[in-house]
Amino acid sequence: MAAPADTRTRERVNAAVIGISTLAALAGLGMLVWILGDVALKGVRAINWDFFTALPAPPGEGGGGLANAIVGTLVLTVVAALLAVPFGVLAGTYLAEWGQAGRFGAAVRYVSDILVSAPSIVVGVFVYLVMVEPMGNFSGLSGAVALGIIMIPVVTRTTEEMLRLVPPEMREATLALGAPYWKMMLGVIYRAAAAGMLTGILLAVATTYGLAALMGMPPLLDAGIMLLAFLFSAAVGVIFGFFPARKAARQDPIEALRYE
Amino acid sequence: MSGPPAAPETAAPPRAAPGDPRPTAGGPPPPPPAPVLDGAPPRGGALGDRVFRGLTFAFAAGILALLATMFAVLWRASGPSLEAFGWGFLTTAAWNPVTVKFGALAAIGGTLISTGIALLVAVPVSLGIALFLAEIAPVRVRTPFGVAIELLAAIPSIVYGMWGLFVLAPLMSDHVQPFLARTLGFLPLFTGPKMGIGMLTAGLVLALMIVPFIAAVTRDVFRMVPGTLKESAYGMGATTWEVVKDIMIPYGRKGIYGAVFLGLGRALGETMAVTFVIGNAHRLSWSLFAPGNSIASTLANEFTEADGDVYLASLIELGLVLFVITFLILGAAQLWLRRMAAPGKGV
């Protein structure tokens, strides 16, 4: 460390840093208010009952809604989750149970960490090549596959982390009762880790909402959609992230075992 | 709630901290963290166990297979372009569908430059925010502030893009860019038409997108610095800044780097937000005001309307290049973080 500067300089530097950092935080919050306020002001006028229940009107006509887009998003996400969740949970189980030591586990963990950040547009191109081109047309299924691929590594890594948090005593107790390993996993360990795994899965689902744009559909844009998209992902994130976490935090593992 | 990609990073420190075995001085490198379960699960055993293990193994292998398939498919599909341009694809900036001449240099450059601007802006700002949230802010406002920052991370990128185009771009062309041109105009970076959209605006929108990620993770890292360490330093008469600079940042270095790499990965592949504001021109210019292009924005703009085998193959090869770039950068970052974690210092 450098020789001690005199106290006044140190205090001045300190005050400057505190000032800058406070400004940065205020600027961040200001941005949030600005973006949200902008989107809300412009979008809220477009929101009415028709917006949710009607089909888009032809260009040039007033009215109309986005029922097809909203339903499409929901269906797409559900199908994607059906594809990705079993895949991710099983792969995560392997990592947690047998992949702690050894090259294979390390390689899978390494690759899924990188795939978490894989550019979504590249996944889109990949799915275009393996599904859209052979089948001859764009389809909801290929969209769901693309979203599923994006979700897999997130679900895998969350499952692994959550399984590793299950106290070893629960495993020992179950095995000591003579349960085979797979019964221990299905009957005890998954249930103990369920809340955390659910949080991870739903967070993965929430991220994909914003990504539907990658499917090469012409983006249909107005401020109302932006507001809706944001509220949708924010609500899903908050509700499904917060409640399982709260539930998990309040639960005693043994109680959870007994009643759930 | 800083988004799912943060999960592995934020989850990593708590595991490291409690174990954190004091490294034996001069001894061999510490062994990898012990598995949670002592005594490995049975390898053979009953049929059910073998089936279960086999099943999980198959899906774990599926992840590796997925990666390999993606590479293979992209490689094969970019065949016509590979054949026509070879390695020259990476070093030429021409992008002309009419004469069927394609090169990736402009898009690669645009991707790297916009990401570079984003990191340059986002890292100091996020550190400031994290510092404020962890040390400076009154305890009562820490939680609401933190949630607000995390909320920024939940905004879909397309919203950032729209906002950048309609709000930030006019602001840039009317105020920020003239100011930069006046004060720093002697640099070639800040010359040229002040259109609002372009490389600089794209970098700023990207920065805005990754700030919440980096800030939220860094705040968590700062919070994990043991109180006794900080208190000892304060007790010696250190100022807040000195505690941060000499205790908290060194202690949490690995976590902070991890957060930055996460933001980097996000910025590299970001598509919609960039497409709106980068200007979509296939050239590489010294000026940051000039419109440019990134790999992702080129794909988003042109993929559905590409006609001709070579055109489509070139776009696919562009995707492959982006995949390789992301893979190399993030892969190197992972390895490096792991190496840094090994000596057992801090989180």
Image (cartoon, coloured by chain):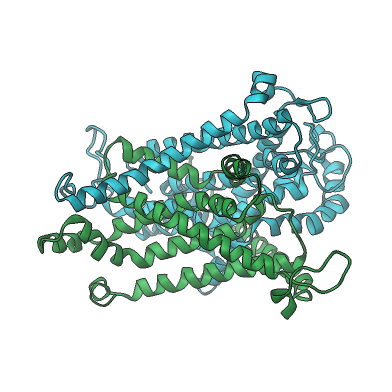
* Res A253 visible: yes
Q: Is residue A52 left or right of residue B68?
A: right
Corner quadrant of residue A122: top right
Of A38 and A83, which appears nearest the observer?
A: A83
Of A218 and B290, which appears nearest the observer?
A: A218
Chain letter, colour cyan: B
Q: Is residue A21 left or right of residue A100?
A: right
Chain letter, colour green: A
Q: Is residue B246 left or right of residue B55?
A: right
| Quadrant holding the C terminus of chain A | bottom left
Name of the residue lying farthest toward the bottom: A49
Q: Position of residue B313 (x, y in %)?
A: 67, 31
* Res A14 visible: no
Name of the residue lying farthest toward the front: A135
- Residue found at x 37% / y 41%: B61
Q: Position of residue B198 (x, y in %)?
A: 79, 43
| Quadrant holding the N terminus of chain A | top left
Q: Position of residue B17 (x, y in %)?
A: 32, 53
